[in-house]
Image (tube, rainbow, N blue to C red):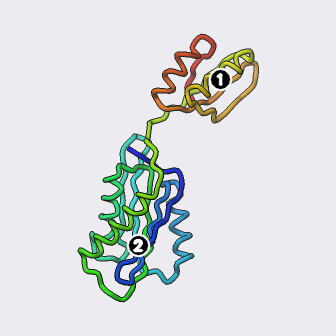
Amino acid sequence: MYFIKKEYENTLEVKQSKFIAHLVPYAHYETLLQKLKQEHPKARHFVTAYRYLNEYDQIVEHSSDDGEPSGTSGKPSLMVLQGHELINTAVITVRYFGGTKLGTGGLVRAYSDAVNLVTEKADLYEYKKELSKKIIFNYSDVRFIEYECKEFAVTVSHKEFDTEVSYTVTASEENMKKFLTKTARVATVTAV
């Protein structure tokens, strides 16, 4: 599975109709949709599709035709996201009608092509499930822990300095396991 880290945009023109596809991380989906509706008041349709992982690691999917004939726009857009194995990603395609009807097959092709083109522009990153842990250790081991965090691509999201030091750390399952093994002699792991 893959995800993106920033927004991408691409425009496709078919028989004077414009299809402006925006590929965006799911966390920015709602905000971008509102922004696009304000920026494009004369656009006819705002077709959407998204896929994200919920807290139970289940893929949640949704698509909307936004007034286009049923099944001709949202579903084909979603199928492109599925085909590229994208998660935590949304696509919004802004359509300006050019005066020529495309028919159902033409709409399916146009929306699929628009989403494919913007996806081809995007940098895709492989999704790896991440774990968060809280570790507690002595002040004297801060440099060692910091070094091992860098070595195993572990992100420190929170630091607390009291009688002991505690870090909340996040990493892929594989890297977390290696990191905890390496730091086991100096750090105690507790629940986050």
The numbered mark, 1 or 2, whose residue comes first in the sequence reads 2
Q: Quadrant of the C terminus?
A: top right
Q: Is residue 131 left or right of residue 103?
A: right
Q: Answer above or below: position of 21 versus 162.
A: below
> Of 129 and 97, which appears nearest the observer?
97
Q: Position of residue 148 (x, y in %)?
A: 61, 22
Q: Residue at x 65, y 21 (%)?
A: 145
How far, Cα to Cα, is label 1 from label 2? 48 Å
Q: Position of residue 14 (x, y in %)?
A: 35, 78
The numbered disc on residue 147 is 1
Q: Is residue 95 left or right of residue 153?
A: left
Q: Residue at x 45, y 73 (%)?
A: 94
Q: Position of residue 63 (x, y in %)?
A: 36, 63
The image quarter containing residue 102 is: bottom left
The numbered disc on residue 12 is 2
| Amino acid residing under circle 2 | Leu
The numbered disc on residue 69 is none
Disc 1 is placed on an element classified as: helix
Q: Answer above or below: position of 105 versus 4.
A: below
Q: Position of residue 27 (x, y in %)?
A: 52, 54
Q: Quadrant of the N terminus?
A: top left
Q: Answer above or below: position of 144 versus 110.
A: above
Q: Residue at x 67, y 25 (%)?
A: 146
Q: Neighbour class for label 2 at 10 Å: few (<14), some, many (≥20)?
A: some
Residue extending furthest top?
185
Q: Is residue 72 left or right of residue 96?
A: left
Looking at the rendered structure, the number of numbered marks drawn on it comes to: 2
Disc 2 is placed on an element classified as: strand
Q: Neighbour class for label 1 at 10 Å: few (<14), some, many (≥20)?
A: few
Q: Residue at x 46, y 55 (%)?
A: 122
| Amino acid residing under circle 1 | Tyr
